[in-house]
Image (cartoon, rainbow, N blue to C red):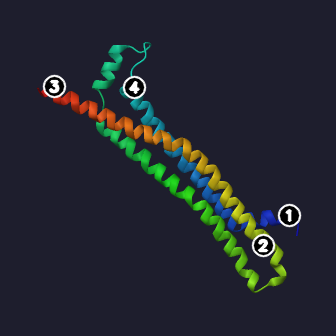
Amino acid sequence: MSFWSVIWQNILGFDGFIFLAAIANGFFYALARKHTMRLYHRLHIMVFLPSRREDPDAVAEELRSVDEEEIVSLRKSSESWYGVFANVTSLFPLLGILGTVISLLPMVAELSDMQQNFFAALTSTFWGLVFAIVYKFMDGFLASKIEDNDKNVALLLDRREIRREAALR
């Protein structure tokens, strides 16, 4: 059996499941990134010092019109989608190992197909590890934005509370 026919056969088998999980995880990443960036952009003018190019009156109005519920809701949705993405990412090595075990189990009964089963086992492990590495790399970029957003939401809410207390005095 040729190299490419074994690859194709494996993709139609358990490796196909790993590819479907990778596609789904790409979708989860896109959703996590979308919600994270929406929150980041919403917080940007409210948390960071405005630049000279921004109209001070517009910045002041933006700060007065902060909808805390919207900010908290955006943070929750961002963290929820990120949690799904991170959990699915952590499954890829396990899926690769599971593919290896599934492929090696029939070797006990049929030693003549040992080479094909061994190759199938290696491709499942390979694809699981490839997607784990790719998504773990992407996770590094998104995790830092989520951490920044958490700090900025806390800072924004603290500032709003200080202003409320000052207004009550």
Q: Which residue is mark 4?
A: 48
Give the residue drawn at x 44%, y 41%: 147
Cα distance, mark 1 to mark 3?
A: 74 Å
Q: Give the Cα distance between marks 4 and 3.
A: 22 Å
The amino acid type, in three-letter code, at marker 2 is Phe
Q: Which residue is mark 3?
A: 167
Q: Which residue is mark 2?
A: 118
Q: Residue at x 67, y 74 (%)?
A: 101
Name the secondary structure under disc 1. Answer: helix
* x and y percentages locating residue 126 in the rendered image: 71, 61
Identify the secondary structure beneath mark 2: helix
Left or right, 81 with respect to 164, comes to right
Q: Nearer the viewer, mark 4 or mark 1?
A: 4
User: Going 84% across and 61% down the picture, which residue do you hit?
Assistant: 4
Closer to the N terminus: mark 1 or mark 2?
1
Please state, as top left, top right, bottom left or bottom right, where the N terminus lies in the image. Answer: bottom right
The amino acid type found where label 3 is placed reads Ala
Q: CA distance from mark 1 to mark 2?
A: 13 Å
x 30%, y 20%: residue? 61
In terms of sequence position, does the residue under pointer 1 or pointer 3 come before the other? 1
Residue 166: horizontal and vertical position, in percent? Answer: 17, 26
The tag earlier along the polypeptide, 4 or 1, is: 1
Residue 30: image tag? none
Mark 4 belongs to which amino acid?
Phe
In three-dimensional space, the C-alpha distance between marks 2 and 4, rounded to whole angstroms, equals 56 Å
